[in-house]
Amino acid sequence: MDWQATRPGETSAPLPERQDAHFVFIGRIRTPFATRDQCPRQGDSENGPECRVEIDAPWHAALMGIAAFAYLDLLYWMHEARRDLVTQTPRGAEPLGTFALRSPVRPNPIALSRVRLLRVEEGALIVRGLDCLDGTPLLDVKPNRCAQSPAQEHRHAAS
Amino acid sequence: MDWQATRPGETSAPLPERQDAHFVFIGRIRTPFATRDQCPRQGDSENGPECRVEIDAPWHAALMGIAAFAYLDLLYWMHEARRDLVTQTPRGAEPLGTFALRSPVRPNPIALSRVRLLRVEEGALIVRGLDCLDGTPLLDVKPNRCAQSPAQEHRHAAS
């Protein structure tokens, strides 16, 4: 794939030198997709393959109560994506601003997927709906808000 | 607020010393909420107050085409949140794992809000649906996937 090439209509800006904050990877995502070409264009939370979200040991207890949710929001780091494109030209389309696209190429390549939670194992979540590379670093797991009933929303809201 | 206190049932783990990745703030969020007590429990994308999402100059062109979307996903950094709680006890509730909550307190305090896009101004988005502090640093803006029609999905998908 011509991941590093620039197509007509694409513009870039160097990432600022400063580092405003840092994060720690809390686990890894295991998918059947070993290369970018194997990744589907979009995850399918109903019919996609089962994937395994492995949580590192210090945060195993942070899964307590998560089995009550049918859908989760996963945030993960697109560790192979370039970060400097300001406008992009999707294949067969007109140029668009990076923030009008869900491309992995963005100044902070944080991906967001809504997944269906199938079951919880020891320190791991089995889900459907991912389209990322095997080994992708995990940043966060949250209950999906849209999928919560009002009662759950009240019960599980932040204090 | 007793932000730093630990309630019954809460457990913590020190954040690892390592820094796995870094990000840059791409702008700031302007809301009417100057203190945590003023922040609503949850944003309201239909009836909440208008908020202004200010994009820094290097990424102004990254907004090109965004006016076509009615709903956006905003990712932002909860810069005042502690990062060490593994289980938490919401007010009046039982303890739950951090990943079963949408509390700002989490190892990577990245917040996710689905907002309604009202209009685009020069280098700024006017939206409804935020519940965060005025001045909150912005990490990313994406079209909301659920809100896209299949035609838009095709047109704006990542290449």
Image (tube, coloured by chain):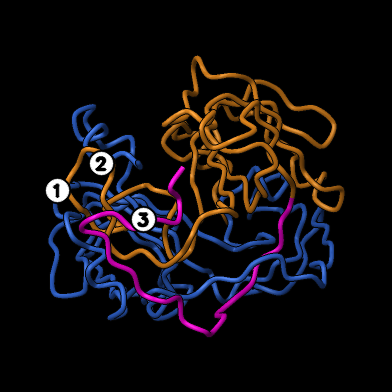
Chain colours: A orange, B blue
What amino acid does circle 1 point to? Ala
Q: Amino acid at mark 3?
A: Gly
Contact (Cβ within 8 Å) of mark 1 with mark 2: yes
What residue is shown at x 41% (from left), y 76% (from top)? Answer: A14
Q: Nearer the viewer, mark 1 or mark 3?
A: 1
| SS state under label 1 | helix
Q: Nearer the viewer, residue B63 or A75?
A: B63
Residue of label 1:
B68
A143 over B1 or under it: above or below: above
Mark 2 lies on residue:
B156
Callout 2 secondary element:
helix
Q: In which chain is the residue bearing label 3?
A: B
User: Does residue B11 appear to the left or right of B43 in the view shown?
Assistant: right
Q: On the image, which quarter does residue A155 sit in?
A: top right
Residue at 65% across, 72% down: B3
Q: Earlier in the sequence, mark 1 or mark 2?
A: 1
